Amino acid sequence: IKSRKRSNSFDISTSRKQGLRLGTNNLRSISCPEGASSDGNHYFSNSPLGNFHEMGTRRLMTDLILTLNASFPDYDFSYVRPSHFTRLPSPSTAMNRTNEKLSEFAATTPSKGRGFLPKLWNAIDDVIVLNECEVYSYVPPTRDEDDDP
């Protein structure tokens, strides 16, 4: 991940349109590791995100990268590969991980922290039904525990 300067504005519709213009040749260049077969068929069909011959998988990859770009605008995610993501077994796994990260805040902020986590998950569940979601975790090949993404 390279740090970079970017404007704070983010237009997902424009970025999504640009990302969805990826053809099979471009997908090979962003997805196949060096030394993969020249046709890439085996690599595309065995991606951790699914089969890259399917539009839904290409869209998922685009959405994940767009989410990273919007969440961490100072980083360059142009070299992210499908292998940098893992699908979590369930939304509750993501909730538990998030609760662990935010529990100190909730415990040390008595007036605002009390009930914060249940309120957070209720608000999120009002917008998306968590039990119907697929949750992915970004796991870059080299990452320090203190790194942002």
Image (cartoon, grey):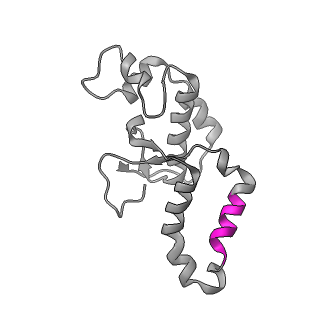
> Quick one: 128 or 69, which is closer to the camera?
128
The location of residue 112, given as percent across then percent down, is 65, 81
Q: Residue at x 65, y 85 (%)?
A: 111
Quadrant of res 132:
top right
Magenta extent: 115-124
**Left-right relation of 93 to 46:** right
Q: Residue furthest top?
A: 39
Q: Report the quarter where the C terminus lies.
A: bottom left
The location of residue 43, given as percent across then percent down, is 37, 23
Say if the magenta span includes residue 121: yes
Q: Residue furthest right?
A: 126
**Left-right relation of 53 to 79:** right
Above/below status of 147 relative to 84 = below
Above/below status of 83 relative to 101 = above
Q: Residue at x 69, y 68 (%)?
A: 119
> Quick one: 71 or 126, which is closer to the camera?
126
Q: Residue at x 66, y 65 (%)?
A: 120
Q: Residue furthest left?
A: 35
